[in-house]
């Protein structure tokens, strides 16, 4: 890793550890592994990729990971894994997203109609259920709150969303998500 990138990575890891607390050390520990932060192979899967290729990777990842993510949410009653980018995609890929997923106005509508849309809906609705439960915003690690802020900002402006997405956005929007 180049020095500035390594310094940013260390800062993120320390922040994740500080925010995580004892119950979420598994989430923060995942950030300690550079392989989990997409540093290896990022050139092959980065922001310069053609948007439809990125969309295909995101859909495949959602199909593969969302059944496990749903089980995690049901079992733990909160997010403990390292996957927020796939559930809350925005115009920016996550720094630690191993597949470099992002959406734009064109690919967002395709994602809503993708073969992973039903699973995506289930994950978002489960997150909304947990947010509205006793843990509130603590159902998601604090490090993910900025991602949710920008997810809402991006998806509110997408036209012709299905009713389920409108409902999820309204449920998420009940909370005061910080930008960072």
Image (cartoon, grey):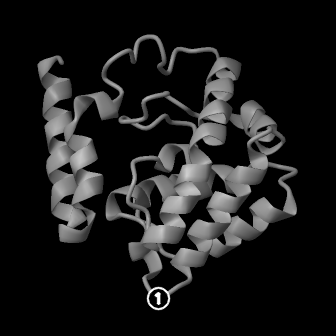
Residue 61, placed above or below residue 123: above
Is residue 105 in sight in this rendering?
yes
Q: Residue at x 29, y 28 (%)?
A: 35
Asked which quadrant contains residue 57, the reply is top right
Residue matched to label 1: 134
Asked which quadrant contains residue 166, the reply is bottom right
Asked which quadrant contains residue 97, the reply is top left
Quadrant where the N terminus lies?
top left
Q: In x, y percent, where is residue 146?
A: 42, 56
Q: In x, y percent, where is residue 50?
A: 63, 15
Q: Residue at x 63, y 59 (%)?
A: 123
**How many numbered callouts?**
1
* Mark 1 secondary-structure assignment: loop
Residue 33 appears left or right of 119: left
Quadrant where the C terminus lies?
bottom left
Q: In x, y percent, where is residue 31?
A: 26, 43
Residue 108, placed above or below residue 82: above
Residue 170 appears left or right of 99: right
Q: In x, y percent, where is residue 17?
A: 17, 56
Q: Between residue 160 and residue 94, name the one nearer to us.
A: 94
Q: Residue at x 71, y 52 (%)?
A: 119
Is residue 179 in sight in this rendering?
no
Q: Between residue 78 and residue 157, name the one nearer to us.
A: 78
């Amino acid at each position: 890793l180049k020095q500035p990138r390594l310094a940013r990575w260390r800062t993120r890891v320390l922040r994740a550890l500080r925010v995580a607390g004892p119950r979420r050390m598994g989430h923060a520990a995942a950030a300690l592994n550079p392989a989990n932060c997409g540093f290896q192979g990022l050139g092959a899967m980065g922001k310069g990729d053609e948007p439809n290729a990125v969309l295909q990777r995101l859909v495949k990842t959602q199909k593969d990971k969302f059944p496990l993510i749903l089980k995690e949410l049901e079992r733990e009653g909160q997010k403990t894994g390292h996957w927020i980018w796939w559930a809350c995609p925005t115009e920016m890929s996550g720094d630690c997203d191993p597949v470099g997923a992002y959406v734009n106005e064109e690919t967002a509508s395709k994602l809503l109609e993708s073969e992973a849309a039903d699973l995506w809906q289930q994950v978002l609705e489960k997150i909304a259920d947990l947010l509205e439960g006793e843990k509130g915003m603590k159902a998601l690690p604090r490090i993910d709150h900025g991602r949710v802020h920008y997810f809402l900002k991006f998806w509110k402006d997408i036209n012709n969303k299905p009713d389920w997405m409108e409902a999820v956005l309204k449920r998420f929007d009940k909370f005061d998500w910080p930008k960072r």
